């Protein structure tokens, strides 16, 4: 089964959910995104059917809603992609959602590689 092609709106919703590692409530999500609850439900249904997210029914402030989270998937990675020379790339053990251009851990690692090459 292949995941469906996502629209720009669905991609935006997915990014919003991904930015909340502990999940977000569906009752808050549609308000945050500025769409009506019915539209939000349809988008989330498509994302759930595509295997991108999971929804867990719960109550918030006495009202039934869903906690929406990104589905964690195992990926097979070529071990050589984890190496830079003799060193393992620090991103292997990192579970942070970050921008590599502003990642302090990656920046420190690159500096360490450069300076070790100079010695």
Image (spheres, grey):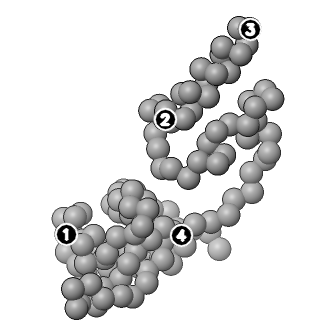
81 with respect to 13 (left or right) = right
Q: Earlier in the sequence, mark 4 or mark 1?
A: 1
- Residue appearing at x 71%, y 16% in the figure: 116
Q: Mark 4 and mark 1: span between their CA atoms?
A: 22 Å
Q: Which residue is mark 2?
A: 103
Residue corresponding to mark 1: 31
Residue 90, placed above or below residue 19: above
Mark closer to the chain start, 3 or 1: 1
Separation of marks 1 and 2 at Cα, in angstroms: 31 Å
Callout 4–callout 1 Cβ contact below 8 Å: no
Camera-nearest residue between 101 and 94: 94
Taking 37 as reference, is 102 left or right?
Answer: right
Nearest the eye: 45 or 91:
91
> Residue at left 40%, top 74%?
68
Which-is-in-front pick, marks 2 and 4?
2
Q: Label 4: which residue?
A: 71
Residue 101 is situated, as x and y percent measured from the top left of the image, at 47, 31
Q: Residue at x 48, y 49 (%)?
A: 97
């Amino acid at each position: 089964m292949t995941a469906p092609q996502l629209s720009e709106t669905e991609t935006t919703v997915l990014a919003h959910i991904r930015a909340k590692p502990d999940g977000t409530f569906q009752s808050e999500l549609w308000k945050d995104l500025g769409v009506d609850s019915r539209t939000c439900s349809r988008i989330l249904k498509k994302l759930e059917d595509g295997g991108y997210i999971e929804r867990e029914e719960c109550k918030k402030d006495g009202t039934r809603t869903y906690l929406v989270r990104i589905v964690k998937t195992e990926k097979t990675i070529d071990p050589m992609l984890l190496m830079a020379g003799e060193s393992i790339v620090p991103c292997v053990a990192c579970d942070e959602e970050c921008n590599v251009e502003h990642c302090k851990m990656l920046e420190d690692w690159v500096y360490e590689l450069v300076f070790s090459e100079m010695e």
